[in-house]
Amino acid sequence: LAVKVNGFVCKNPIDVTAEDFFKSGLHIPRDTKNPVGSNVTAVNVNNLHGLNTLGISLVRIDYGRMGINPPHTHPRATEILFVLEGTLLVGFVSSNQDGNRLFSKVLNRGDVFVFPEGLVHFQQNVGHHNAVAFAGLSSQNPGVVTIADTVFGSKPHIPTDIIAKAFQTEASIIAAIQANF
């Protein structure tokens, strides 16, 4: 019978090898030719089993020109972003009880920015060339909830009249947006 910790199978210590703690390939640029112009490559407990119980993970984010990492949250992790190449506009929004304040900054090569756990945040390449960033997350499995995908792309759709009222717009506009997802 396999023993699971945090939902992942733990190997017998006798069977553990260096390969359980190793991943390569993060030096390879990823394709950013998609609707948002970015590509996130995750290194977490799902693809690096040695992370199980360690409480950390990592992502590489490639941004095309004007590419974005759309507004999203990590329900189980704080994120610290490091800009390797390029110029990024980054920001997060405080909680409702804190007045939904936007904390935003333009980052350049070598800069770091922290996104607190669970708060909506984003990044946009505002430079003249592609950009690359790495982010450390304080969970082996931080989760990601992309706001637009969640609100407009649920299956089945959230009723358009509910979203229209929440966004204070017409149901026809919401239906048109939902059609893109």
Image (tube, rainbow, N blue to C red):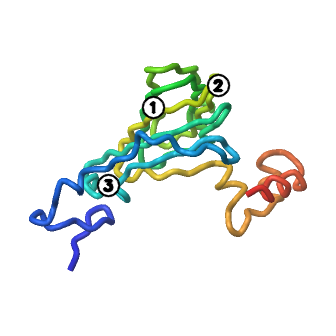
- On the image, numbered disc 3 is attached to which residue? 48
Q: CA distance from mark 3 to mark 1?
A: 20 Å
Q: Residue at x 40, y 43 (%)?
A: 26
Residue 117, position as x, y percentages in the image: 45, 40
Q: Going by the image, does 48 lie left or right of 28?
A: left
- Percent from the top left, x then y, of residue 69? 59, 40
Q: Secondary structure at mark 1?
A: strand
Q: Position of residue 97 (x, y in %)?
A: 58, 35
Badge 3 marks a residue whose secondary structure is loop
Query: Quick check: 27 above or below 14?
Result: above
| Amino acid under disc 2 | Val
Q: Around disc 1, counting alpha carbons within 10 Å, would you say few (fewer than 14), some (14 to 19), or many (20 or more)?
A: many
Q: Nearer the viewer, mark 1 or mark 2?
A: 2
The residue at the far left in this view is 14
Please name the residue shown 57% across and 23% down the image: 87
Residue carrying label 1:
81
Q: Which mark is residue 126?
A: 2
Among the two numbered marks 1 and 2 on one chain, the one whose residue lies closer to the N terminus? 1
Dot 2 lies on which element? loop
Q: Quadrant of the C terminus?
A: bottom right
Q: Earlier in the sequence, mark 3 or mark 1?
A: 3
Give the position of the N terminus as an image quadrant: bottom left
Type of the residue with mark 1: Leu
